[in-house]
Image (cartoon, helix red, strand yellow):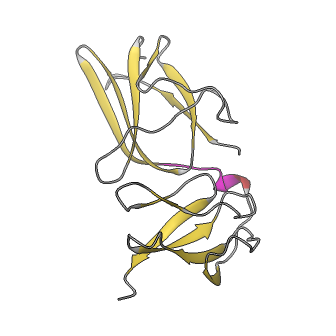
Amino acid sequence: MALAAKNIVVQNEDGDIQENVSIEVRREIAGSPLASIYSDRDGTTPLGNPFVSASGSARFHVAGGAYRIRAFKEGFETIWRYVAIGTAAESDFGSFRPRGAWDGETSYDVGDVVSYSDGESDNYAFALSFGGDGSNAPTIDESGIGQSDANWTVLNVFDLA
């Protein structure tokens, strides 16, 4: 699974590079959980979160989504909100194709849209957006919230009742 890369340079209001700055990456969703970030595209070498950038420039890899990135050290802090990170820029993607409820026996293509629920939480619409064959179920976290991941992107929440 290839993860998206994000490169940042941390500067103050005057444009001065900020060295020895901590970088914190959180999902831009309710509760703002810390993201799982990696130093490599394959996601095999985890980075601490937060991690320290000695030079003021930083690079990390993460599953696609919207993120809140905070750079901080004593006397300095900057926060970037709703930073879109994803590998979709590496794909040609033209339209969505509704495919009904997700089925583990079906092979899906980029752009296919499925509905999915774990039976206990809301129903979600997901689009296969980052590759793979869609054989892994879309993700619903322990609190019942649909999550974008390396293959599926949350499009909508709906109630069938």
Q: Does the magenta stretch include residue 75?
A: no
* Rendered-image quadrant of the C terminus: bottom left
Residue 3 relative to residue 10: left or right: right
User: Where is residue 135, by image quadrant?
Assistant: bottom right
Q: Does the magenta stretch include residue 87?
A: yes
> Which residue is at a point 67% across and 54% down the rendered structure image?
89
Residue occupying the far bottom of the picture? 161
Whether residue 145 is visible to the viewer of this picture, yes or no, is yes
Image: 73 above or below 30: above
* Rendered-image quadrant of the N terminus: top right
Residue 47 relative to residue 133: left or right: left
Residue 96: x and y in percent read 64, 78
| Region rendered in magenta | 84-89
> Which residue is at a point 68% across and 70% down the rendered structure image?
104
Residue 50: x and y in percent read 40, 25
Residue 26 relative to residue 5: left or right: left
Residue 133: x and y in percent read 75, 63
> Which residue is at a point 35% across and 53% down the rendered structure image?
29
Image: 129 above or below 59: below
